[in-house]
Image (cartoon, grey):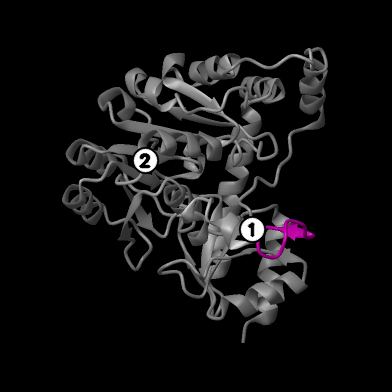
Amino acid sequence: MHNDILRHLNPALSRISAYAVEGGQEAPVKLNQNESPFDLPMWLKESIASEFVREPWNRYPDILPYRGIEAYAEFLGVSSRRVIMGNGSNELLYTIFMAVLGPGRKILIPEPSFSLYEKIALLMQAEIVGVPMRRSLDFDPDAILDRAKAQDVDLIVLSTPNNPTGKSIAPEDIRRIARESGAIVLVDEAYIEFSRFESALPLVDELPNVVILRTMSKALALAGMRIGFAIAQEPLMAELAKPKIPFASSRLAEITLRQVLANYSIVTDAVSYILDEREHLYQELELMEGVEPFLGDTNFLIIRVGDAGAVFRSLRSRGVLVRNVSGYPLMEGCLRCNVGLKDENRCLIDGLRSIRP
């Protein structure tokens, strides 16, 4: 492309890359995208599909997915005016960042954290204030608060439990950061169903600057449906929703959400299975020479293996796909592997044993 064309583009594009998944998205044992190993049962899929086929496909859905919003608000026990639904939580990240950030604005992001935060902040030409995790990969709440106040940041984003570290920040620390910083605090709870900590959702009642982000892609096993939610007090939500793309959520997503929430025991049973397998997997990894697992609160585990690239490729050649996260700060030599079915987890253990010294 000629330089005279490139000069018209957002200059931030030179600092970011297109999203990619190393190793692809297909493998006999796929443990690289933090998905649930359980698909919805066929009877529920057929029920969802039979309802959807009766919808008029030639008509736009609602400007905002009000029926999905009402269903999830009722599930949470909050006012629907506090809730917005998006085409996955990623869309809502773009929406919220657009509402808050811009040139001259500041965002605090603990490091390492979900890579999309930095990408959107760069696109918005905001200043990024990084705060390193501790060597244990745990959050450093005092450092976050100190930096937030010293830099007078506009937005703090806390992924808890955190991707990629798997660690959580306690709700009382979130409360202190939100109260004392004065910034808008976005709490991304994509993995909250797997956490040892309680949700920060009650803080929305207490504090007007707290926003909770949820996804249906992990515990609810709906990654293919693209459903996410944000929750905040009504005055803040009314402003954050202004950049929201209209018509972005399909009626299929709304129908799927409502039917899954009505059959929520499917979710709780799956979470229970995953937590049991996470414990077994951690115990086996802890006994393995040359592998250091980190105890976390998500549906994945971080393991330090030395030469992460070589181990990643060896596992890939054996049909086991994990995520190489060794490029993140403080995560040299680390891989991320989500918890799968028993047989899948056994393939991971066997693969690691076969390539360790």
Residue 232 drawn above or below residue 341? above
- In the rendered view, does 336 fall on the left or right side of 318? left
Mark 2 element type = loop
**Front-most of residues 290 and 57:** 57
Q: Quadrant of residue 62?
A: top right
Q: In which quarter of the image is residue 200?
A: top left
Give coordinates of residue 350: x percent, y percent.
70, 71
Q: Does the magenta stretch include residue 29?
A: yes
The tag earlier along the polypeptide, 1 or 2, is 1
Which span of residues is magenta-colored? 21-32
Q: Distance between the residues labelled 1 and 2?
A: 25 Å
Q: Residue at x 42, y 47 (%)?
A: 159
Residue type pointed to by label 1: Ala
Give coordinates of residue 128: x percent, y percent.
34, 54
- In the rendered view, does 91 fall on the left or right side of 230? right
Q: Which residue is drawn at 17% across and 40% down?
A: 180
Q: Quadrant of the C terminus?
A: bottom right
Give coordinates of residue 41: x percent, y percent.
77, 32
Q: Residue 97 carries which label?
A: none
Q: Which residue is drawn at 79% across and 17% down?
A: 57
Q: Mark 2 points at which residue?
A: 101
Report crowding for label 1: few under 14, some 14 to 19, many 20 or more residues within 10 A (C-alpha): few
Q: Is residue 188 magenta?
A: no
Q: Residue 20 carries which label?
A: 1
Report crowding for label 2: few under 14, some 14 to 19, many 20 or more residues within 10 A (C-alpha): many
Residue 231 drawn above or below residue 279? above
Question: Magenta stretch mostly in which secondary structure?
Answer: loop
